[in-house]
Amino acid sequence: KKCNIFYHTANLYDKLIELYKIKNTQYKCKFNGDNITSIEYDNDVLLLANVNHRSGYDWKASMKLCQLYKLVYKNQNIQALTSEIFQQFNIKGGQRAKRSVSENCKQMIKDKQQ
């Protein structure tokens, strides 16, 4: 009850069809393009696809970025998070501003690139 279940796949289409065949119920789901990214299952259980599946990352990488930059985790992909982070670093009161990146963050970026 009231939990999130993550799947190592980019699309939950097969899971939705499987649930329909078993339960004969159409569950509410969310899409990102033609991919089903979440299914609202019984007892407030949320089934979530790994939106970073194609880029080789998982939700843990997204969660780390959200914690590091104090963002709310909403199962965003890495691309969406980097866009949000970019906006945080480059906007200050409506003006563009140059911000510095912490050494910890620089090292994390370098490690990921290698």
Image (cartoon, rainbow, N blue to C red):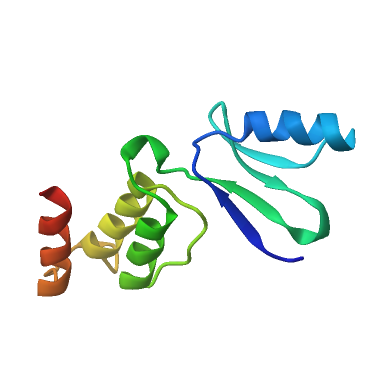
- Give x and y (percent) for residue 60: 40, 59
Instruction: Tell whether 94 sits left or right of 114.
Output: right
Which picture quadrant has residue 66? bottom left
- Quarter of the picture containing the N terminus is bottom right
Q: Decide: is 111 above or below 103.
A: above
For the residue pair 33 and 97, the one nearer the viewer reads as 33
Which picture quadrant has residue 52? top left
Residue 98 appears in the rendering:
no
Instruction: Tell whether 37 sits left or right of 114.
Output: right
Instruction: Tell whether 46 sits left or right of 58.
Output: right
- Give x and y (percent) for residue 59: 43, 54
Q: Decide: is 41 above or below 108.
A: above
- Give x and y (percent) for residue 3: 67, 64
Q: What residue is shown at x 76% (from left), y 42% (from top)?
A: 28
- Residue that lies at the very extreme toward the front in this rendered image: 22
Q: What residue is shown at x 38% (from left), y 73% (from top)?
A: 70
For the residue pair 8 and 99, the one nearer the viewer reads as 8
Q: What residue is shown at x 76% (from left), y 50% (from top)?
A: 41
- Residue that lies at the very extreme toward the right in this rendered image: 24
Instruction: Tell whether 22 sits left or right of 82.
Output: right
Residue 15 appears in the rendering:
yes
- Give x and y (percent) for residue 8: 49, 43
Q: Decide: is 58 above or below 92.
A: above
